Amino acid sequence: MSLFAGARPLLYKEILRFWKVSAQTVGAPVLTAILYLLIFGHVLEDHVQVFSGVGYTRFLVPGLVMMSVLQNAFANSSSSLIQSKITGNLVFVLLTPLSHRAWFVAYVGASLVRGLAVGLGVFAVTSWFAWPGLAQWWWIVVFAVLGGILLGALGLIAGLWAEKFDQMAMFQNFVIVPMTFLSGVFYSVHSLPDFWHAVSRINPFFYLIDGFRCGFFGVSDVSPWESLVIVSLAVVAVSALALHLLKTGYKIRH
């Protein structure tokens, strides 16, 4: 059985799982992004300009799109695993002859689909308020896909580690949310004090958002090639850890 053939049924199940409640898993994040845009854009449009010739609302759109991709890719794999562990239906997946690689492809693949679906929804709605442009579209595609894979794999790790919803909420609140808000979604990192600027530069989310934003405006805080290297290394490292945990049956095989 090929890797994709084995992963396909589980991938289909995971996509169907979030799509059946799409108002919650896709619609709600789009609404949240619109509220961010309306509030921050209205308050700061006339007071902040990060890139020359780019209004603040336009600057904000790519950041909100990528933030939505990252948060929802993470939420998909992490919530699926923790729910399956708590309800006990994970045993039915364990009984299948699927390899750890097939598990990885299915869970991360579904996370990527959800992240991109939400990102496209956010882009479609927010760009109606302020069209950001498409200067170098290939960077948009590359960083959106890499971001979905990275956070899908990170969600897989969090879902394997957590044994109850409290632990998952802690991971979300103390890891994902701070990394997201210190990544330059709402500002340029060059506007930060030296300490927080240094913290942002070791955050892979910053390079995801900066490279993604470069695809819209053609300018960025760092070279998109530098961002690509750092993000790719992060994807490889996190994916390798997730695969290792799946192979050893960490907290799912007793």
Image: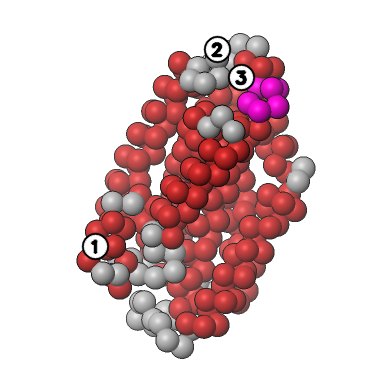
Secondary element at image label 3:
helix
Q: Which secondary structure is most common in the magenta stretch? A: helix
Count neighbours of disc 2 (C-alpha within 10 A) and say few if under 14, some if 14 to 19, many if 20 or more: few
Q: In the rendered image, which residue does mark 1 sit on?
A: 195
Q: Is residue 58 above or below residue 91?
A: below
N-terminal of the pair, mark 2 or mark 1, is: 1
Q: In the rendered image, which residue does mark 2 sit on?
A: 254
Secondary element at image label 1:
helix
Count neighbours of disc 1 (C-alpha within 10 A) and say few if under 14, some if 14 to 19, many if 20 or more: few
N-terminal of the pair, mark 3 or mark 1, is: 3
Secondary element at image label 2:
loop
Residue shown at 30% from the left, 70% from the top? 192
Q: Position of residue 189 (x, y in %)?
A: 32, 66
Residue shown at 39% from the left, 59% from the top? 183
Q: In the rendered image, which residue does mark 3 sit on?
A: 6
Q: Amino acid at mark 3?
A: Gly
Residue shown at 52% from the left, 21% from the top? 251
Q: Residue furthest bottom?
A: 46
Which label lies toward us, 2 or 3? 2
Over which residues does the magenta segment extend? 84-90
